[in-house]
Image (spheres, grey):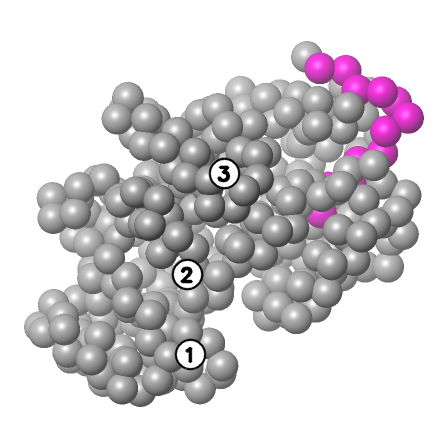
Amino acid sequence: MVVASPSHRIGIVVTDSYPAEDPDHDTPLLLSALQARGVAAAPVVWHGDDDLTGFDLLVIRSPWDYPERAADFAAWLDRADAATRVLNPPPVVRWNLDKHYLRDLAGAGIAVVPTEYARTDGDIRRALAAHGTGQVVVKPAVSAGARDTGLFDAADPAARALAQRIVAAGGVAMIQPEVPELSAGAEKALYAIGGRFTHAIAKGALLAPGGGLIGGVYVEHPEPVEATPAERAFADDVLRAVAEVTAHDVPLYARIDTVDSAEHGLVVLEVELVEPALNLHVAPHVTGVVADAIARAAG
């Protein structure tokens, strides 16, 4: 156990309300573990009026309503960055907020799910036509929690309509091939704290064919699973690529969403460096690892 100086004050960045079906399980456990280590830690609502200069470190954890207030969150990042140290660092967070980062990772040699980015109706038509009679996933380049995300037949007018809606709102639509293993629930989230693998979680399939979410609401069903040596090595490669393309140290926390597919091999679906749920309630052995990493970061 790492014991931090009692003079250090750490803010755990959260929001002020969560859906009943998607609560923040991590923060109460993490606060308790930090306090057991002598750390003066408290939740900080990102859109609140706290004096951020009063904290020695802010750790972004669960500001899960930021996609609805993207401009406000960008302004908060600037304010927090000017006031104190923030982890993960704001430049890394800004890079990770836009899923164009998948291009950067691919350029660094990481296998990612094939992705086309559509900015116009012409882009949308061409991207969907390229998939013929196959299935596709349509989603925004800036989003979280499967917002405005759907699984469709490529020729379904609803696929084009969703992409058009994303573009009309000023966003960029991502169009990816459906990965059968992903639709079957084989997605695996690999977690790393301080650059070291800690645990893996399977959360099951989320998208219903034809658009929308299974059951109509965003509900994850996290279950701890084993990660193979190849998956752990892949996670290490992804973290090295993140450090390379962002020119920052390996992030304090990371979730690397992967699927091992027959067609594409082992690929990255997303790398979440902003506010990934760590699922500490089903991986309790990781709580102390995270608390120790934060205490070390506080100095």
Spatial CA distance of label 2 from label 3 is 16 Å
Quick one: label 2, few (<14), some, or many (20+) residues within 10 Å?
A: some
Q: Position of residue 48 (x, y in %)?
A: 81, 59
Q: Are marks 1 and 3 in contact (CB under 8 Å)?
A: no
First in sequence: mark 2 vs mark 3: 2
Q: Position of residue 74 (x, y in %)?
A: 67, 64
* Residue at horizontal 33 percent and vertical 50 percent from the top: 107
Position of residue 94 in the picture relative to residue 16 (left or right): left
> In front: 83, or 276?
83
Q: Amino acid at mark 2?
A: His
Q: Amino acid at mark 3?
A: Ala
Quick one: label 3, few (<14), some, or many (20+) residues within 10 Å?
A: some
Whether residue 218 is visible to the viewer of this picture, yes or no, is no
Q: Amino acid at mark 1?
A: Ile
SS label for mark 1:
helix
Q: Which residue is mark 2?
A: 100
- Placement of 292 over or under 202, stated as above or below: above
Q: Which residue is mark 3?
A: 243
* Residue at horizontal 81 percent and vertical 44 percent from the top: 84
The magenta span reads 2-13
Spatial CA distance of label 1 from label 3 is 30 Å
* Res 166 label: 1
* Res 86 label: none
